[in-house]
Amino acid sequence: MKDKSTTKKIHSLIDKVYRPINLLMAWEKVKENKGSGGIDNISISDFEKVMYKELDTLHHNLKNDTYKPLPVRRVNIPKRNKPNEKRPLGIPAIRDRVCQQALKNRLEPIFEPTFNECSFGYRPGKSTHQAMRKIYREIINGCEWVLDADLRDFFGNVQHEVLISKIAERVSDGRVLRLIRQMLEAGYMEKGKKHNTTQGTPQGRPPKKVCLKGEFR
């Protein structure tokens, strides 16, 4: 990441997260991304039928600090090119996906400018093709070594306190930090049993792009 000494710290953010227009933007992205529902068995189409009511309820829950995320639904899917190995996928309830996307809408503009220009993973407007072009330019400029490495189960081993402390370097809004902690510690359901999550993040994430379709009220 770039030098944080000259970056501004955000003190009030939660009101931007639960703003109705932001929740509607978040819902549009969740709907666009499709996917199945969580442990409450509510699908995208089910949610859409009562969308205005659900978004209004989410708005008031976040505003009044009464929002509680549900545990994610855990499924195990085969790893690409490794059919004998599986990776866990956490599927949040649609309502929780909307909340996650609403939070992402507000956090991404804060953190995105601080990332290094040579970082390409999980960033809006970045691609593997751009990363390859960067590598090619480095080779042309005389670099001779290429390191191909992977962190084993990175997302499954993320330390919650370390992650939250890094976010707190830019965001001091306690309610936002508590909301992130709630999401991290919501746990997961597998084979009818709830499991706590003391580390790691669910490997299911909101989509990257954001669109604007008016305000609900």
Image: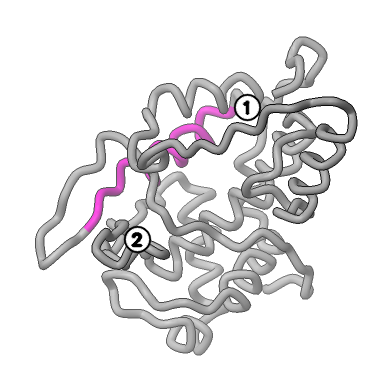
Quadrant into which the C terminus falls: bottom right
Determine the main secondary structure of the stretch shown in magenta: helix
Q: Residue at x 49, y 73 (%)?
A: 54
**Distance of label 1 from label 2 (alpha carbons):** 28 Å
Q: Residue 147, how many percent across, how many down?
A: 59, 32
Side of 155 relative to 207 (left or right): left
Stretch of the chain drawn in magenta: 173-188
Count residues near mark 1 (Cα–Cα under 10 Å), then give few for <14, some for 14-19, many for 20+: many
Disc 1, disc 2: CB below 8 Å? Answer: no
Quarter of the image where the N terminus is located: top right
x and y percentages locating residue 211 in the rendered image: 76, 68
Residue beneath disc 2: 89
**Residue 56 image point, x, y percent:** 55, 68
**Left or right: where 205 falls relative to 85:** right
Q: Quadrant of residue 21?
A: bottom right
First of labels 1, 2 by sequence position:
2
- Which kind of residue does numbered mark 2 sit on? Leu
Element class at badge 1:
loop
Q: Quick check: 191 above or below 157?
A: below
Q: Which residue is mark 1?
A: 171
Q: Is residue 185 left or right of residue 110?
A: left
The answer to which quarter of the image holds residue 125 is bottom right
36 shown above or below 99: below
Viewer-nearest of discs 1 and 2 = 2
Please check the rendered image and state whether residue 185 is part of the magenta-colored stretch, yes or no.
yes
Three-letter amino acid code of the residue under disc 1: Val
Name the secondary structure under disc 2.
strand
The residue that appears at 64% across and 70% down in the rendered structure is: 29
Residue at image location 64% in from the left, 45% down from the top = 121
